[in-house]
């Protein structure tokens, strides 16, 4: 039984390795490799979510499994999306227009892709060593959440954007700079102390299994039919959820401070 969760972790690593190989094989003439790389990263997210749950359900949690899972996340959700983000967003820029701006975008893109990777690695390291992380926008008592955007969600944003365009690479230098800005922002969210929903309170053993089965069936059909739009909508909605939680908490804090300020007497 101890092998079972490790098999899901191995599937996670296999998907990440496949995504890297596909990203490196892509060309401007055949960009379907990019789409396959993005889908591989997307398929790795359920593997990452299931290995831990299976280990807890079968009571087979171990230090080896936790370390293996963390290393797998670095490969699949750190290295693979970084390589994909660089090759899809910068390496395929056409040799037209201002070539100096193109070279600047490529050079900066290498650094931005590495920045995404190092932010993800730092996010995992903080998660591994922190026992009770305190977010800067705490939620309701008892509600489980992540402190900082989890690295699988960050990789999901990168993969969903690539898949939304069916792997067709960026062919404009201004758009490449916009892509760099998005990667920097995702990296910031990973190392931030903002609260993101974990979904750990959802269990498959809840009541009304038929309703859950119907919802999953409908979701699966929509995902299979409109995956380009469904995946990017889900990933961006999750990213925005942490931003909205932070803004709402800041607004509540300002209102609380104003209510605590004593009223000053009015002088004539």
Image (cartoon, rainbow, N blue to C red):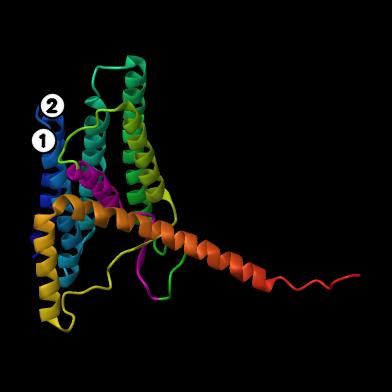
Magenta stretch, overall SS: helix
Of the 4 image quadrants, the one containing the N terminus is: bottom left
| Camera-side residue of 190 and 71 | 190
- The residue singled out by tag 2 in the image is 27
Q: Give the side of residue 45 with respect to residue 140, left or right.
A: left
Distance CA(mark 1)–CA(mark 2): 8 Å
What kind of element bears circle 2? Answer: loop
Residue 155 placement (x, y as % from top left) = 26, 47
Q: Quadrant of residue 241?
A: bottom left
Vertical side of 106 occupied by 225: above or below? below
The residue at 11%/68% (across/down) is 218
What kind of element bears circle 1? Answer: helix
Residue 63 placement (x, y as % from top left) = 24, 58
Of the 4 image quadrants, the one containing the C terminus is: bottom right
Residue 123 placement (x, y as % from top left) = 36, 49
Vertical side of 30 occupied by 264: above or below? below
Residue 58 in view: no
CB within 8 Å, label 1 to label 2: yes
Q: Give the side of residue 163 with respect to residue 197, left or right.
A: left
Residue stretch in magenta: 142-164
| Camera-side residue of 156 and 76 | 156
Residue 161 in view: yes
Vertical side of 127 occupied by 101: above or below? above
Vertical side of 45 occupied by 52: above or below? below
Q: Give the side of residue 237 with respect to residue 261, left or right.
A: left
The residue at 31%/58% (across/down) is 238
Q: Which mark is residue 33?
A: 1
- Please tell me whether residue 152 belongs to the stretch shown in magenta: yes
| Camera-side residue of 57 and 97 | 97
């Amino acid at each position: 039984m101890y092998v079972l969760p490790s098999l899901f972790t191995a599937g996670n690593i296999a998907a990440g390795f496949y995504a890297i190989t596909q990203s490196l094989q892509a060309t401007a003439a055949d960009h379907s490799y990019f789409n396959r790389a993005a889908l591989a990263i997307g398929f790795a997210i359920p593997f990452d979510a299931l290995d831990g749950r299976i280990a807890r359900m079968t009571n087979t949690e171990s230090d080896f499994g936790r370390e293996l899972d963390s290393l797998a996340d670095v490969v699949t959700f750190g290295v693979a999306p970084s390589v994909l983000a660089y090759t899809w967003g910068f390496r395929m820029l056409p040799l037209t227009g201002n070539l100096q701006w193109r070279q600047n975008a490529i050079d900066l893109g290498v650094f931005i892709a590495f920045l995404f990777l190092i932010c993800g690695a730092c996010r995992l390291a903080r998660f591994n060593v922190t026992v009770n992380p305190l977010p800067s926008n705490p939620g309701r008592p008892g509600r489980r959440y992540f402190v900082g955007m989890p690295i699988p969600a960050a990789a999901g944003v990168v993969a969903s954007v690539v898949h939304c365009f069916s792997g067709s690479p960026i062919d404009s230098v201004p758009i490449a700079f916009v892509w760099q800005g998005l990667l920097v922002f995702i990296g910031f969210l990973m190392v931030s102390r903002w609260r993101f929903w974990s979904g750990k309170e959802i269990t498959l053993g809840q009541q009304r299994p038929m309703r859950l089965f119907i919802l999953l069936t409908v979701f699966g059909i929509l995902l299979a039919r409109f995956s380009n739009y469904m995946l990017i909508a889900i990933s961006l909605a999750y990213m925005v959820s942490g931003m909205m939680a932070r803004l709402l908490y800041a607004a509540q804090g300002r209102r609380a401070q104003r209510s605590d300020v004593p009223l000053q007497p009015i002088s004539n």
